[in-house]
Structures are given as C-alpha cells and as structure tokens.
Image (spheres, helix red, strand yellow):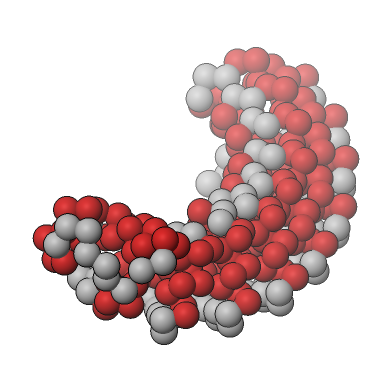
Amino acid sequence: MAKQDKQLVEELSACVGGRKWFEERYGEDADVPLAEVWAAIPHDDWRPILLSRSPDLTSALLAIGADIDARNRDRQTALMLATLSGHGDVVERLLDRGADIDARDRDGQTALMRASWHGHGDVVELLLNRGADVDAQSRDGHTALMLAAWRGAVNVVARLIDHGADVDARNYWRQTALMLAMMGGDVAIVDMLLDRGAGVDARNKCGVTALLTAAWRGDVAMVDMLLDRGADVDAQDEDGQTALMMAAWGGHADVVSRLLDHGAYVYARDRWRQTALMLATRFGHDDVAARLRAAGA
C-alpha cells in the first residue's frame, strides 16, 4: 500500500475508533484498502463528518464512491459540517465535486446559514461566489443575514449585503436583521443595515420596533443612533407602550432624557392606561420620575 493511502487509512481509522479498533478488526500492521475501512464504518451517521475532516481524505473517500450528500441524524451533509468548522479547503473541494450547496438540515438551515452564524467570512464568500441562495430561509424564517447580525459577525454581514441580501426579510416572529442586531447590541451592524436601507421602524409580531427594544435595554448609544436615523420616537407596540414607557419602567434615566430631547410624548398611555410617569413611580425610579415631571408629565 502506498504511504499516502496508508496515512489516509490511519486517519479514517483514528476518527472511527483509533488504532485499537483497526487492530481488533484487521490485525496489527495489516494493509487494508481505504474502501474496505470505509465500508466497515459502524454508523452511517458518522459518514458526513468523516467526509468533512480534511481535503485529502475528502477527495480519497469521494474517489471510492462515498455519497457526497450523505446525511447524519440531523440531516446535515459533509458540506454543512465543513462550513460549521470553517474548513474552507474542504468546502471548496466538496463544491468542486458537486455537493448540494443549498441542501437543508432538519432545521431548514443551509451551509451558508451555518457559516454565517459561526462568523466564517471566507467560507461565506466562497459559498456566495459559488451561487448559494443568499436569502434562503430556515424553518423559523431566519436568513443568513439575520443570523450573522444576531451573532454580531460584522464581516459576514458586510459580505452578505454586498451580495444582495434582503435587509428587510422577516422571520416567523416578523423580526428583521436590524431587530436581531439590536439583541446583540452591535452598533456597527445596525449602522451598516441602516446605511443599506433597512427599515428603522419595522415592527415584529408584537409591534415592537428597534427603538423600543433599545429603550428597554437602556442602550444609550443605540437609542441615539436610531433617533438620529429618524426612528419614530412615539411608536407604540401592540400593548400601546412607547420607548419612553419602556425606559421609564427600566429606570434608564439617560435614555429617558434622550427621548424627551427628541420630543417624546409624555402623556401617552398603554392599554392599561399607564403613563411613563406612572411606571417610573410604581417601580421606584425617582430620578426618572423627576425628569418626566420636569418635562411636564
């Protein structure tokens, strides 16, 4: 057996059960063809991960007839698993051999979505250049852009947008990439999305806007950016709550001041007829209550 073939057999055996597994099955120092070891893999569930281990092993296994789009119990293919790990060389080799670039796992996620969530910018670029569907959505409606924005992967967000990703696509909960970026608290990503035309006043299933979320979190920098970009300071969610109420409820005095400076309506009431002042008083936020009274509440 050629030295390289023996190394590949050893690599494959090590992944399966190590030298002990090999020797128990074939004996010590046996020259066993790679195809025979591959056929002896005890669990089909292992095949996709073994196909994604290294470029040389990938090529060798494909050469002996391994199914390039075989799936594990989570419906993941070798391509998906290689993108998870950021193994660009393996991803390229699989694509060169015809791997299904837009195959979906049991959650409806593609290789592009997995690479985006894990922040593997070079792999994302490779997949996009090979024709991956940039706006494919998972079972819960997430796109690669949403996942990258949520995770705070700035370099991935930029690449996806450059390849035409829909900045206002919505998931099952009617969230956009902007709203998910808010959850990650990444000002740079929010700024980038707004520069590319993301709707600043988009609402989720509960009527919540990015500004309402930022106010609830007490994120002064994010509130400032959204207000400067024209966010509706008096937008109300399905319960009638405004950003001012959210900030008052949470005791975020600096956010309250920013909202008041931008003309927030202090007399607005939610479905329970509560005002921002009532909420501040109820939860013992005396500083906030004082600022609201000074503004005429």
* Number of residue marks: 0
- Residue 144 lies in quadrant: bottom right
Name of the residue lying farthest toward the left: 24
**Relative to 209, is 111 on the left or the right?**
left
The percent position of residue 152, horizontal first and vertical second, equals 64, 44
Residue 166 seen in the current view: no
Which residue sits at x=20%, y=70%? 42
- Residue 49 lies in quadrant: bottom left
Q: Quadrant of the N terminus?
A: bottom left
The percent position of residue 127, horizontal first and vertical second, equals 67, 68
**Relative to 45, is 229 on the left or the right?**
right
Which residue sits at x=69%, y=39%? 186
Residue 18 seen in the current view: yes
The percent position of residue 291, horizontal first and vertical second, equals 73, 20
Which residue sits at x=58%, y=40%? 274
Q: Observer-nearest residue: 241 or 157? A: 157
Which residue sits at x=57%, y=29%? 250
The percent position of residue 75, horizontal first and vertical second, equals 39, 74
Q: Observer-nearest residue: 47 or 77? A: 47
- Residue 124 lies in quadrant: bottom right
